[in-house]
Amino acid sequence: MLRPLFQRPALAAALLAASVLAAPAQAAELRSADIHPDDYPTVMAVRHMADLVKERSGGKLTIKVYAGSALGNENDSIEQVKLGALAMARVSSAAMHNICEVSRVPSLPFLFRSKEHLHKVLDGEIGQEMLRACEKAGFVGLAWYDSGSRSMYTRNKPVKTVADTKGMKIRVQQSDLSVAMVEAIGGNATPMPIGEVYTALKTGLVDAAENNFPSYESAHHYEVAKYFSMTEHSMTPEILVFSKRQWDRLSEADQKLLRQAAQESVPYMRKLWDQREDKSRALVEKAGAQVVEVDKASFQAAVQPVYKRFVTTPQMQDLVKRIQAVQ
Ligand code: GTR
């Protein structure tokens, strides 16, 4: 009869050695969170980044993506990233507003003139500067992802001009800037995580919300708020943030590899994003949503106080000026 393993030290030692040899040196699994479902462009892009990282590190570094709010809402994920309990999160940069003020800049209403303008800014030096801005607060910015532009959608009546939003209860992201923007257009801002918005719209807790076509579609908001008014009031991009605590424990080579892979996932994401915007718009329109043209200038005039209130530091003022000057 064979003796139990612990009574056969030579064999136990050999087995242990073999298992150590089989495991890649310092193999590390990094966890990443996203509130969006599996087929959403942000989730697919981080999975693409994970493939690159795994391949290039020879399996030493892996990224496991937890989609669909499996690790909580955006504020929960950010908290965990800050603590170092979670390596990475793909969030809206609006989720960073209350953490570091420079993150508010790309959300300023009507700041970007077009998608091309946004890309030029984010792909250049200004984009890099804004990615670095939250490092002191514990977040290493790895990449910007697209999120189209955000527009207002309502349950009862279409919004056509800024006068129509007066007194409306409007759900916003959990950010002081988003609250101020809705107040500037005469609405009552109700901040809440996106996971609560469907019910809030359905029960009439709020009259309206605002988002891009893919989120309006994937969160099923079009079923309960069928007027989609093309206010296109902000182009808040998505951001991929890495925990500074975990980052500082990585070798320089691994940091470089992660940054590179994150950057390379950007064009992949943009392609998926463009396709998804068209697909989502077609789907909601087919399901009965009405896309409404609006008097944009009336919104643009009303939100000007937001700049005064939030663009307060010399760095932010300089960023806004430089962004506006990008042709
Ligand atoms: C989406 C964004 C999400 C989330 C959501 C929201 O456009 O991709 O990360 O911030 O908006 O409105 O809460």
Image (tube, rainbow, N blue to C red):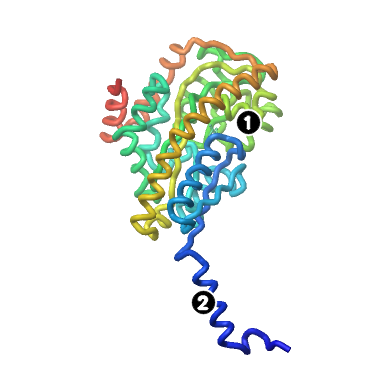
Query: In this figure, which residue is indicated by the disc labeled 2?
Result: 17
**Percent x, y for residue 248?**
37, 57
Depicted 321 relative to depicted 71: above or below? above
Residue 229 to residue 264: above or below: above
Q: Could you tell me which secondary element the residue under label 2 belongs to?
A: helix
Q: Is disc 1 in contact with disc 2, using a CB cutoff of under 8 Å?
A: no
Neighbourhood count class around disc 2 (C-alpha, 10 Å): few under 14, some 14–19, many 20 upward: few
Disc 1 marks which amino acid?
Ser
Q: Quadrant of the C terminus?
A: top left
Kindly identify which residue carries mark 1.
218
Q: Position of residue 118 (x, y in %)?
A: 39, 26
At a point 54% along the width and 31% down the height, the residue shown is 172
Q: Is 106 left, or right, of 18 in this rendering? A: left
Could you say which is closer to the camera, residue 220 or residue 144?
144
Q: In which quadrant of the rendered view does residue 293 lie?
A: top right
User: At 52% from the left edge and 68% from the top edge, which residue is drawn?
Assistant: 22
Residue at 53% in and 74% down: 18
Which residue corresponds to the image point at 26% horizontal and 30% vertical from the top-left? 318
Real-space Cα distance between discs 1 and 2? 49 Å
Q: Quadrant of ligand 1?
A: top right
